[in-house]
Image: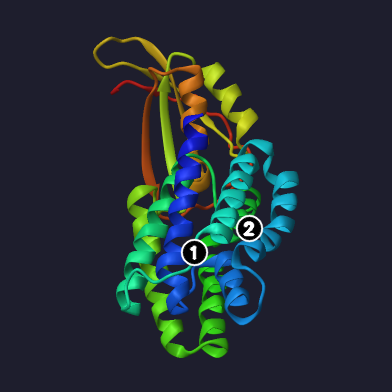
Amino acid sequence: MTRTIVIFIGSLLIAIAYNQFLIPHEVLSAGISGIAIIIGLLTPFDTGVMNFLLNLPLLIFGMMKLGKRFISYTILSVIVLSTALYYLPVYAVSSDPILSSIFGGVLSGIGIGIILRYSGSTGGFDIIGMILAKKMDFPIGAILTGLNGIVILASGFLLNWDSALNTLVSIFITGKVIDSIHTHHMKLTVTIITDKGEEVRDKLLSQLYRGITIMDGEGGYTQIKRKILMTVISRYELADMKQCIRDVDPQAFVNITQTVDVMGLFNRDQSKTALQMKNL
């Protein structure tokens, strides 16, 4: 219930950012929502309706590839955002387009950030990123940046270049706010020290596509034997991994570190190792 409420609030914040700050000044958002805003500005079609219709095929594809749990929260976000865009009035809180771009970017970044933090997404390019992140070690950040670049160029050619530059400012600020709330690294190394190694392993393998390396560990002071599990995940999987660990062993020690790059079998089973570690 808490996650549902948070995703509802986050989606509502995004809709307010669009209708009260961005759309009145012809400033676009990133991703599918940005395309929906362009269509809403240039045609009689409503932005909220277009946001839902454009996301619909991606949601269906994501349901097949990502599973019902993740997509169910994404569907909730898309429905709330699209409905709010349809019913909330479009009016400018500020007459300054630059200020509106900044505050709209901050507000939408807060909304998207808390949705990501609670294992959801706003649909669109996030679904594409999730699918690629789970299936292959792909430069997701570069792809998403490229797709957003197309949105910015489209705003320049179809609207005007002031709108394109303001859109760039808004998208940049949105990304920075998301980074501060969620996490900006695409890959993360997770180390888990637990008394329930086998149970945690089974839970993670049933929920994630990543391999897990298992090591034997011993407490330096207590000399108690424990299992050490290590894996590398994408940022999209972080919230689900935390929940899996809490479900099995709430007392587990978990260390999450940023990973600059990965070589080898990032998306396949890693070999188990048995290393005796004495200095824990």
Q: CA–CA distance between discs 1 and 2?
A: 30 Å
Q: Based on the displayed image, in which of its 4 quarters is residue 127 positioned?
A: bottom right
> How many neighbours does mark 1 have within 10 angstroms: few (below 14), some (14-19), or many (20 or more)?
few
Pick whichever, 72 or 239, lies toward us: 72
Q: For the residue labelled by badge 1, is the local secondary structure a helix, a strand or a loop? A: loop
The x, y position of residue 100, in whole percent, is 34, 72
Q: Earlier in the sequence, mark 1 or mark 2?
A: 1
Q: Nearer the viewer, mark 1 or mark 2?
A: 1
The x, y position of residue 256, in whole percent, is 38, 38
Q: Is residue 29 visible?
A: yes
Relative vertical location of residue 65 with respect to residue 101 in this rendering, above or below? above
The x, y position of residue 36, in whole percent, is 61, 69
Q: Based on the displayed image, in which of its 4 quarters is residue 34 positioned?
A: bottom right
The x, y position of residue 248, in whole percent, is 50, 18
Q: Are marks 1 and 2 in contact (CB under 8 Å)?
A: no
Give the amino acid type for the residue marked by disc 1 in the picture: Pro
- Count of numbered marks: 2
Residue 89 is labelled as 1
- The residue at the point 74 percent across, 52 percent down is 61
Pick whichever, 102 or 272, lies toward us: 102
Pick whichever, 202 or 229, lies toward us: 202
Relative vertical location of residue 140 with respect to residue 149 in this rendering, above or below? above
Residue 175 is labelled as none
Residue holding disc 2:
128
- The residue at the point 50 percent across, 63 percent down is 141
Pick whichever, 37 or 226, lies toward us: 37
Give the amino acid type for the residue marked by disc 2 in the picture: Ile
Q: For the residue labelled by badge 2, is the local secondary structure a helix, a strand or a loop? A: helix
- The residue at the point 45 percent across, 17 percent down is 249
> How many neighbours does mark 2 have within 10 angstroms: few (below 14), some (14-19), or many (20 or more)?
some
Q: Is residue 126 visible?
A: no
What color scheme is it?
rainbow
